[in-house]
Amino acid sequence: MKHFLTFLAFIAFSIQAADKPNFILFITDDISWDDLGCYGSKVAQTPHLDQMAKEGMRFNNAYLSISSCSPSRCSIISGRYPHNTGAAELHTTLPADQPVFPEALQAAGYYTALSGKHHMGKAVNRGFDKVSGGKGPSKSADWVPMLRERPKDKPFFFWFASSDAHRNWKLNDKAPQYKPEDMEVPPYLYDGPVTRKDLAEYLHEVSRTDYYVGQLCKELKEQGIEKDTYIIYMTDNGRPFPRCKTRLYDSGIRTPFLIARPGTIKPAVTDSLISSIDISATILELAGAKKDKRIQGVSFTSVLREPQSKTRDFVFAEHNWHVYQAHERMVRFGNFLYIRNNFPNQPNLSYESDDRTPAGAELWGAHAAGKTNPKQYQIFANPCPPEELFQVKEDPHQLTNLAADPKHAKALQRARALLTKWAKQTGDSVPVNPTPNRHDPPRIEDGKILPPGKVKTRNPHAEMPGASKNATKINHPGPIRD
C-alpha cells in the first residue's frame, strides 16, 4: 500500500510538472540590439536567431535598466532598478536581502541552474540548484550536457550566460570569421582598418551565440520538449565600443529580445515597450509562481498573447559608475528618448570601450589628428550636455539633440516631469560622495593622446545612488502607464 501511494504521488507530481512550462534564459555579454540579422544587420550570420525570430516573437523596443555588466544582471534577477538593488555600480554584488526570482521557481517545484558568466555575487546562488562556471571560450559548452542531465521529474529554469561578445576576442570554429571590408561601421565610430577588424572579430562572437542557440533548440527537439519550453535571447548591455556600452543611447541600452515556444507563442513582431526588470514578473506568471512584492517589474504576458497590447508607456534606465564617475538617467516614451546627465562636467566614457580598445584607440587617434566629424565628437565632450532629447525613429543613432529646439518643448517638459517623478517614487538620488574614477580619463593635448594612468588596486565604492533615500527598501515601480 505504501509503495502504491508513493507511485500515485509520483504520477500526480509528474502531471503537475508537465503542466508547468520550462524556461531557458540565454543572456549574452555586450551585444547591441541591431547586430543580429533579424534586427536588420546585413552582415551578421545568425540563422538560428533569425529562425527563432521568425517562429516566435521579436521585441523591437526592449530596454535594459542599465548598460553595465553586473548591475544589469543584478537588476534582471531581482526585477528591480539598479539603484534599488544596492548593486548599482560595476563590480558590486547583489545584497542578500534582495529578491532572486529563481527562488520563487524553486518553491513552485522547478529545478534551477546557472551556467556561464555570473557577476552577481554569492547571494544569488541560493536561487539555483546548480551553479557552473561554464566551459569553452564562450562559457557555453556545458549547456547541452546540463540540459540532458537535469532531473527529468521537474520543470526547469536555466540561466545560461554566455561570455560572448565580451573582450578580449577568442575566435574558434563555432562561428564564421568575417572580413573587415564587409563591416557596417556606425557613424559615431571612425571608419578605419583597425575599427573594421575590431568589429569583424566582435561579430564572430555574436555569431557564436547563434551557434549555441541552435544547439539548445536542437537538443530540445531531440528530447521532445521544445513545445514545453520558453527560450529567451537577450543581452546585458550594448557592444563594447565607443558610445555603446554603459551609454543610454539605443546602442547601449536597447537589447535584442526574442522569445519562442512553438505552439504557444505565435510568430509576431511587437513594438510594445518592455524593461529588463519585467522579465522576472513575466516568467513567474507563466510558471504559476508567486511574485515577490519587492519586484518592481510588470508582467508582459499579455503582449505574448496579443503583440499589439501594451503593458508600459514608459521605460527608465540609469548609468552609474563604471570605472569612471557617471550619473545619467533616461526615459523612453512614445517616439522620444530623453537623457539627463547629473555629472555633466565628467567625461562620459567607458573604460572597456572608449580608450582601451582598438576601435577606441583609433577613434581617439583620428580625433587628435583632426580627422573626425561632428557625429563622432560626442565621447570627447567635456562638459557634456545636461539634457538630451531625441526622436528615435527619425534618429536611430541619437545624433541630433533636440533639447533646445522650441518645436519639442512640450516633449522636453513631459520627459523632465516623468524622470523627476520616477526618481522620487523609486528613491533615486545623486551621490554627494560618489565613487571616484579608478583612472584619470584619457585626454588630448597638443595633438597627442595622454592615456589613463594605471591603478594597481580597485578603489572602494563610495556612496551609491539611492543610498540617501534608503532606496533598497523602496518597492514602488515608478510610472508605468499614462
Image (cartoon, rainbow, N blue to C red):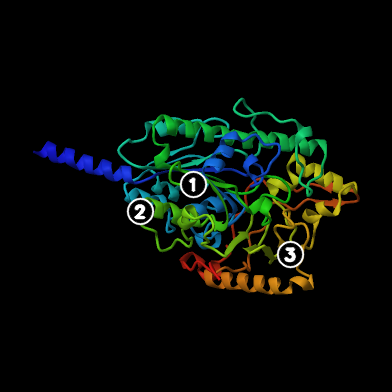
Tell me where residue 359 sits by quadrant. top right
Amino acid under disc 2: Gly
Q: Position of residue 13 (x, y in %)?
A: 25, 43
Q: Earlier in the sequence, mark 2 or mark 3?
A: 2
Q: Position of residue 128 (x, y in %)?
A: 40, 44
The residue lying at 60 percent from left, 60 percent from top is: 317
Which dot, 1 or 3, sits closer to the camera?
1
Under circle 2, the secondary element is loop
Q: Position of residue 94 (x, y in %)?
A: 49, 54
Answer whether residue 438 is visible to the viewer in this image.
no
- Decide: few, some or many residues near mark 2? Use Cα within 10 Å; few <14, some 14-19, many ≥20: some
Q: Which residue is mark 1?
A: 266
* Closer to the camera in the image, 90 or 186: 186
Under circle 3, the secondary element is loop
155 displayed left or right of 67: left
Is the residue under label 3 in contact with that under label 2 (CB below 8 Å)? no
Amino acid under disc 3: Pro
Amino acid under disc 1: Lys
The alpha-carbon separation of the residues under discs 1 and 3 comes to: 45 Å
The alpha-carbon separation of the residues under discs 1 and 2 comes to: 21 Å
Question: Is 166 rendered above or below residue 255?
Answer: above
Q: Which residue is mark 2?
A: 288
